[in-house]
Image (spheres, coloured by chain):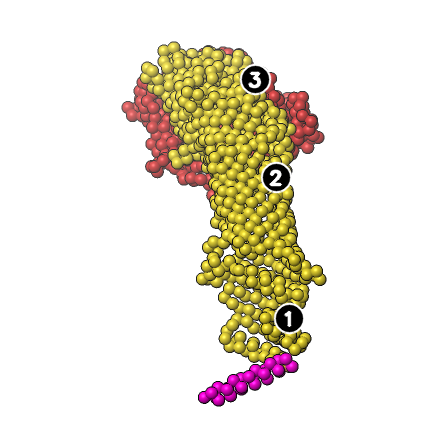
Chain colours: A yellow, B red
Amino acid sequence: MLRFVFKFFLFISFCAAILAGTWIIAPDLYINQRTLGFCKLLLERFHAGISWSEGTVSIASESLLVKRLDLTLKDIRIRKESFNAELPLFHIQGSLSLKLRENLFQDIGPIELLSKQVVLQPAPDSSAEDRSWNFRPWINFARQTIKGPIQIQVESFQSPSFSGRFTIAMTRSLSDQYSLQVDADNLKDLFFQRANLKLTKASNSESFQISLDGFYADPKGNNAVLAARGRADTQTFTGQWSLNERSRQMGEIQLNTCSLQASSEDFFSLRGKAETQCQGQVKDAKLLSQLPLGMKGISKLLFNLNANLKWFSEKGRDTIVGHAQVHLPSFKQGPLRIGGTADFDGRWDGRPDYSRFTMNISNFIEVPKFQELVASLRQTTHPIPAPFHHLQGSLLCNVSGEVTFTGMRFEAPFQCTSDLHSKSQSIGAFAKGQVIGVFDGARPKIELQTQLTANDVQLVFPELGQVTQLPRLTRDPRIDRTANIEKKAVSRAIDFKYDIKITTKASHPIRILNVPYTQSIVPIALNIELVSERPMIGTIDIGHVDLVFLRRKATIDSVRLTYNNDDVIDRSAALKGEVRVVNTEVTVHVQILGTVKKPVFVLHSEPPLPESELVPLLVYGQSPDLLTDSEQQSSESVRAALAERAIGLASMYYLASTPIESVSYNPASRVFTARVSISKNVSLSLGSDAENTNIVGIQRRINQSWSFETTAEDEGIHRRGVAMLRWARRY
Amino acid sequence: MRRILTIFFAFIALSTKAFGQDLKKQELCPHVTLICDQTLTFTSAELALICGDGKTRAWSSIPLVQAGEFLKTFLASRGYHKGIAQIEKDHLTVQSGPISMIREVHIAGESAGIDASRFWPISGVPLTSKALDDLDAWLKRELANRGMPCAETKIEADSEKGNITISFNLLIPYTFPRIETEPIFGINGEVPRRYYSFQIGDLYNIQDLELSARRLVTDDVVLSSHFITECPKESSEIIIRQQMVTGKPRLVTFGIGFDTEEYLITEATWGNARFGPSASSLKTNARASFRKQSARATFDWYYAPVITRHFLRSVLRFERQNERRYDTRTFWGDVGPGWTWDRMDHFFEAWLGGSYRHDETVRGEGSATANSFAFAADLQALQHDFEYFAATPKSGHQTNFSWRRMRKGLGSEFSATNSIVSGTYLYNLFAFDPAIWILGLRGEAFTTQFGDDTEGDEVPVSFRNFLGGSENLRGFSRKQVPADDRGALTSAYLGAEARIAHVLPYRLQPIVFVDFGRIGMEEMKLDEPVFWSPGFGINWQSPFGTLRGTLAHGFVEHRGERDYSTMSHAQFYLSFGEQF
């Protein structure tokens, strides 16, 4: 038995000696084309997922125990569950040492790798911890073995975190200084499209210099340049960074010479923390210039940034959490005084829609002197309009509270107060609400939600003189309607929505002065809601107004306009109100119902009288018995027009407040025409001025009894024309 | 063709405006300048909003941007929709841009039989709200004339192209329901139905309603009347209510006036159109002029216990005529039943009765005195269009027939039969609305036939006819034809006229016409000469009525040797109230 064992070991020793001898003398007996082909066959047999089309391998002796390997593989295809790659060329040279106590790989290099496409996918069952690779042994290995240059080109690299094209080059100088340079281009899902990373390490130092330059640009004109310089080892980084970003909305944001201290459990592991402080500024902020303020004053905003961040990988996503503070020192620019602080807390989960921030903000924008704002906007396209441009006082808006960011959405609360006044006008109002912004689409979406309370508002109408015809202040919607809708749709750079509730206190309605045909102040109480893309809803209440004009006296007791689209067919406000016309013995009440576009007037009186007697009282202030024929005819026309809803609100206003000369009504076209006396010599035509030419004969009344008329008279079978001055009396 | 004509008249209308003129600078206030192709006027209210009102401090100055927006809006209301505002050194300059003219109007979808190009006044005029309002009113009227009073119109305009697009909604035709009327004090509430030009169940037509209301007012039954049409919300029928102002029943008037043929006139009238519950009518008047003095009392007695359109008419009349050819005094007394009715878009009136007449001829041919009793019949047929547009005639026709027969010994001192037929036909060429070309024909045939037992000189001159005057042969003097003072026993007249309306400014309407007439000195026979008179004239639709001036020349065409040269001359007429 012992002999057998001896013989066996002798045989083994002999074989080993032969193998060692042949390896020493002729290593190509083991590593040659056939063994390469055999390896390829084995890999295919065991479905290793690696194949190549052609390969060459050679090995040569450098010494008895050190052999020089030269391997070239072409058209390599790697198909693994989490890794796919197409490598047109892989070339590596290295020295293999059979010396004891030495690594098998004595030195490696040069290495050349050309890759068309590399795809990294997380394995379905990979946990977060699996992705925290320990690079340290590999770095040590590379540091000890790689001597020659390395050149790696990846035309297309795709991973869950980012993708792009890379060129990686590593050299080792004679002074034993390592230099690694990564040039990346066409990057996606990273902050930058192009990046250049350079790491330089001296052989006698554990730390290395890092230099990172990144650049981002998109077709919309947004771009950013990031530069970071510093010293790092495998766990810490100390240095400086700067960012210069230009965006279409925000203008130019500069963060200069920011200090940064970062530490990692491992430099290459996705877990660490950082602290940074810097000063920044926003220049040429276009968002500000697009606001109605549009003033040239705000060209630059200075701020300070302090941030403490941590990052790690969780549930397959790279996550950053931390706190940042932006402080805007108070400053006055043009008519505005601006200042405040914003504290950010939150987490960034790799994608905006997974991320969430909260911001405690305490900012303010103040217009200490309203007239300065008026002056600064006077030459712009958005001046403060009349009658507000004569007001004095101040405006103050505080944006304070917690702003919530969810993905690319934020909500910011605000409160604004106004204290504006002049000799005849005042605007004292308080607004509270929030601004919601969403930036995840092609157009930024801004939504304003606010509750505005008018505490003390008094406005004045212009002195329009003898109003023979109120000017039209809006364009006829029938003209160019389609073109205007398209124009509005195109012109909106920002998708702006609003929901504004406006209310007045019952004791402090809005007061309008200088309304035509009344010496009274017209009180208006509002409770309305203005919502974009929806007609206004709510109520407008006009209070007690005395209309005094010449010898007539009328009183608006109340008028309520209710805007509620569910109830109204013609999309105008529902009306409910009452006007009183006081005569000597009879008070005529005009109930106003229907809608603004089609008002309905219902008459009743104290003491009660039939409608046929009320209309003459309303129009002429007299009972029908005392009216002339033409006045009675006019009264009848008013009745007909009232019944057919042909009298608009404006016409009724004049009818109730001014003496009527005559009225005609054409039921076919529903055109109501009234002549009212404005003054002794001036008459006003309301409605269409069309002549009713179809009446046989034309009569022009001179006074109550006398008229001039031309008639065509029948005389037998002939018609004769006669012009006659006629006195008439009916009894 | 109609469209081309529309464009043609639009061009004429445009030619009266500032078209293609050089741009003008207009300083509205020291800091606002308007550059426009014409000088525009702004109301004081508009100027207050552009330049500041100067009285209220808050509105004493208007920021230039705001003033520019106001001005552009005011320009849009005048048809300038492409205004551009420029501000330089505290000065606002607004360029009005070109005025937008309405070039084409078309109806999208169901047209309801409406041809919008007929409404020509908006073609070629500035695209303004008023033009659109006018179009909308016209469309509503057209729809209401086609039985669709509840239809909705939608109008959209493109200022760039000048196109107007119309669309309709709720094109549902309705028929006349039973109409609710208000009670009229003292008379039967059914009386207004006597004046309706339609029957219940007929297709709704707003023109019929207006005509019915106008008849009621013209007959003095009420002072004013309107029909109110309510569109159905749930039911399938419209509701029509008639409102009226009755006024007091008795009317007395006194007037002094001017008639182009009778010169100075004085007139006194008294009437009561609401006698009894059936609203019988008594009207009297007395009139005096240089040529004619008359007094007349007419009583239309609706004696039936139910409201019908049947009445008994009684007329008493005295008249003195002091014409160049004769001087007569006549007294009439007529009595007989009459009927009115409306059928097939026409109004008919018939009267049958007896007529007593006493004639005295102070000067002129014929019997010095004559008493006669005649069996009389009058018939009138009037198309509703003709009746509706009586003041501004443009279409329709009417026919009148009058017949009198007297027998010696039967209350008459002579035997004679007098027949008169007359008619008018108007045609609105190309159916423009308002009408532009109006063609008219009118004619009259007159004859008096004597009985075998009657000589010509037994019959008073008033049973003979004379032509000439503004009523027929406008190239001849009043009652100039025939030259013989006896007058004609037979006459025929035919006149043709063409009028151009609504094209010239100041409501002037040129007319051309030609009249033809023939007379016969014997019964039922027309003599050889043809009297004709071509002429022209002008209508002025003045604020006080139509003033018409015509100038024509009378000609006599004949083969005989008789000399008519003294009759041929130019004749000018000026008249009030007459149309055609």
Judging from the image, mark 1 belongs to the subunit labelled A
Local crowd size for mark 3, using a 10 Å CA cut-off: few (<14), some (14–19), many (≥20)? some
Residue B398 vertical placement versus B260 (above, below): below
Q: Amino acid at mark 1?
A: Gly
Q: Residue at x 65, y 78 (%)?
A: A64
Instruction: Give the residues drawn in magenta, as a range.
Output: A1-25
User: Is disc 3 placed on a helix, strand or loop?
Assistant: loop
Q: Are marks 2 and 1 in contact (CB under 8 Å)?
A: no
Judge from the rendering whether residue B173 lies leftward or rightward of residue A378; answer left or right: left
Picture quadrant of residue B358:
top left
Q: Nearer the viewer, residue B141 or A467?
A: A467
Can residue A127 be seen in the rendering of this structure?
A: yes
Name the quadrant of the N terminus of chain A: bottom left
Q: Are marks 1 and 3 in contact (CB under 8 Å)?
A: no
The spot of residue A590 in percent (x, y) is 39, 21
Q: Which residue is mark 3?
A: B56
| Residue A45 magenta-highlighted | no
Q: Which residue is mark 1?
A: A94
Judge from the rendering whether residue A404 lies leftward or rightward of residue A24; answer left or right: left
Q: Residue at x 61, y 52 (%)?
A: A232
Residue B473 vertical placement versus A232 (above, below): above
Judge from the rendering whether residue B517 lies leftward or rightward of residue B149; answer left or right: right
Q: Which residue is mark 2?
A: A279
Q: Amino acid at mark 3?
A: Thr
Indicate which disc, 2 or 1, sits on the residue closer to the N terminus: 1
User: Is disc 2 placed on a helix, strand or loop?
Assistant: strand
The spot of residue B10 in percent (x, y) is 61, 34
